[in-house]
Amino acid sequence: MEKQIITIIGSTGTMGSELIDLLSKSGASIRAVMSDFSKVREIPGVVWVQADVSDASTLEATLAGTDRLFLLTGNRAGFGKTQIEIIKTAENLGVKYIVKLSALGASPKTTSGLALEHWEAEQVLENTKMTWTILRPHAFMQNWLGEEAKTVKEEGAIYAAIGDGKVPFIDARDIAAVAAEALLHPEKHQRQRYVLTGAEAIGFQQLADAISKAIGKPVVYKSLSMEEMRTRMEKQGIPTKSIDSLLALAAYQKAGGATERTSDSVQEILNRPPYSVEQFARDYREYFIG
């Protein structure tokens, strides 16, 4: 019997790369879609396809023959329309099953533009004839490898606008492992919406302490107001719409309550606990060393 083709959109980022590795080890037949061909790696069972999925004219050729699809795109404003076009094309081509990476808080009532676009794409997917699984992870730990790693190296400090708020950040490796499990065993996970979090909600002070211990140097947490954080992000060249969305999320996290809730989904699906912030800091310590 011919192997089913699992197509991965979003195959070269932190999570996508981990997902590709996990699926390859399982012996799956994988089509990895990417826009930058310089990121190609030689991996058993993986065929690389270069395509710009935001260009609707490329989608039929990119998705033809796909049985199962993992959907992850960038989060620039307007990404929801790209995902909806991918979903519609997949349905027309006879794709049987989609695992969509969404976001916690995806809702028609959200104040976050990012979460709203995810919700709109979810609605289109749920109303197709395909089966699906939706993953709604909380904030990725790997997001700290950008600006936070830079300021730790340069200033020994971390900046955030959530005050003493706590968030059950999740390691992208856990999300990839859940996605791999769903793609390999859709019969167990179809029509499920999984909220994915770490085992505990942590604040940025705990993150600073974990990094400090991992690198052997003091790291301090500096809490900023929303306006101070807006100014920092403007200086970094982040688009205004993205800043608005990120600050809406920060305000939600600062308020606490629902944003602090943890989920047991990772433990239940993988039969192991999620990675802790301390383990993350140890595994990625080189990113924080100046």
Image (tube, rainbow, N blue to C red):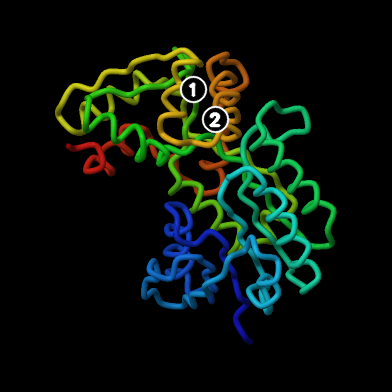
Q: Residues within 10 Å of mark 2 (few under 14, many from 20)?
A: some
Rendering quarter of residue 220: top left
Secondary structure of the residue carrying numbered label 1 = helix
Percent across and percent down for residue 43 are 39, 74
Residue found 65% across the figure and 53% down from its top: 100
Q: Which residue is the site of mark 2?
A: 243
Are the residues tagged 1 and 2 within 8 Å (C-beta)?
yes
Left or right placement of residue 226 versus residue 109 in this view: left
At label 2, which amino acid type do we have?
Ile
Residue found 38% across the figure and 36% down from its top: 144
Percent across and percent down for residue 67 are 68, 72
In the depicted structure, whether residue 72 falls above or below residue 49: above
Which of the image's four quarters has the C terminus? top left
Secondary structure of the residue carrying numbered label 2 = helix
Left or right placement of residue 5 versus residue 80 in this view: left
At label 1, which amino acid type do we have?
Arg
Residue found 80% across the figure and 46% down from its top: 123
In the depicted structure, whether residue 109 falls above or below residue 275: above
Residue found 57% across the figure and 18% down from its top: 251
Q: Which residue is the site of mark 1?
A: 230
